Structure formats: structure tokens, C-alpha cells
Amino acid sequence: MILAMAATALYSALRFGIVSPMLPLAFLVVFFLAMTLMGLGLFFAALTVFIRDTREVLQLFTAAGLFLTPVLYLPGTLPGWFETAIYLNPFSHHVWCLQDVFFHQGLMHPTAWIGMFAVGPLALWLGVAFFERTRHNFGDAL
């Protein structure tokens, strides 16, 4: 992801002659995304020990999750129920923050930034707490 962000910044500099002044904030977005992913990873790693089909369910939701982020389309062009699902997806906030950094070059989605700052530490805390609470039973379950 860091390489893709560097390539995007380089393309913007070469093609348009500008680099976003918010570029350092992209690393902050990646940091909070990593926190979210680590928390979810710890949670699902512990859950997989007890529920064997977790991997298959996660693969299904990961594939479906691609369509629940504002990567393929703009949220304003969707039906109301689908737009609500996009807003409830915690990864949408990271996408909007990266769009603010690279494309809008300003804070166009302030609630996404607040959501990102809240979701990352919360996901990490919940993931670590669940992992620590259940790790003592891993040997019995395996």
C-alpha cells in the first residue's frame, strides 16, 4: 500500500505538477488502517480456533466487502439501503480519508476522519482483549 501511495504521489507530481499538501496524513491513515486490521486479525484468529468454518465465512464477506466500500462507485449514486451499508463499513472511512489526501487535497469527509480515529483503536483493543481472554483455551480446542 505504501508503494501504491508513493506511485500515486509520483504520478500526480509528474502528470499535474502538484503533490497533495496532505500527503503526510496518508501515513496516519495507513497506521489507523493497520490498527483496524490487527484488531480484526487477532479477533478472527482466536475465533478460528473454536469455529473451524470462520475462514470460509471470512472469504465470503471479504469478497462481498469489496462492493461495500466506496472504491467502485460513489455513495450518492446508490439506493438508500446500500448506501447505509457503505457508511456502516469501517473500511469506507479509510477509503474516504485517502481520497481526501490524494484527490480532494482537503478535508471533504470530516466524519470519516473521526470514524477512522475511533474505529482503529477500538478494533485493536477488542481484538487484543478477545485474543487474550480466549488464548488459554487454544490447547484444549485444538
Image (spheres, grey):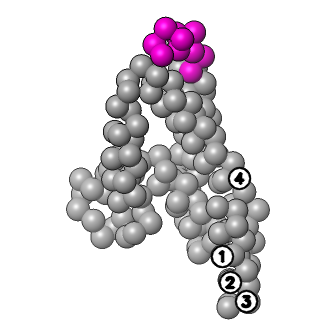
Check disc 1 and report the residue beneath it.
8
Query: How would you rate the neighbour count of disc 2 (Cα within 10 Å): few for under 14, some for 14-19, many for 20 or more?
Result: some
Q: Residue at x 66, y 76 (%)?
A: 8
Are there few (<14), some (14-19), or many (20+) residues within 10 Å of tag 3?
few
Where residue 28 is drawn, which disc sits there? Answer: 4
Q: CA distance from mark 3 to mark 2?
A: 5 Å
Please name the residue shown 71% across and 53% down the image: 28
Query: Which comes sooner in the sequence, label 3 or label 1?
Result: 1
Q: Which residues are magenta?
A: 131-142
Q: Work out whether mark 1 precedes mark 4 in sequence or the reverse, and give the earlier one.
A: 1
Q: In the image, is 23 to the left or to the right of 138?
A: right
* Tag 4 secondary structure: helix
Query: Label 2: which residue?
Result: 11
Q: Nearer the viewer, residue 17 or 50?
A: 50
Residue extending furthest toward the front:
142
Q: Point out the tag, 3 or 4, that comes first from the N-terminus.
A: 3
Per the model, the C-alpha gap separating discs 1 and 2 is 5 Å
Indicate the position of residue 38 as horizontal and vertical percent values.
60, 38
Asked whether the beta carbons under mark 3 and mark 2 sit within 8 Å of each other, the answer is yes
Crowdedness near tag 1: few (<14), some (14–19) or many (≥20) residues, C-alpha within 10 Å: some
Quadrant showing the N terminus: bottom right
Q: Are marks 2 and 4 in contact (CB under 8 Å)?
A: no
Q: Is residue 55 left or right of residue 121?
A: left
Instruction: Say what amino acid the circle numbered 4 marks.
Output: Leu
**Which is closer to the viewer, label 3 or label 4?**
3
Residue at screen point 38% across, 32% down? 54
Q: Quadrant of residue 51?
A: top left
Secondary structure beneath disc 3? helix
Image location (x, y in percent) of residue 82: 27, 56
Q: CA distance from mark 1 to mark 4?
A: 17 Å
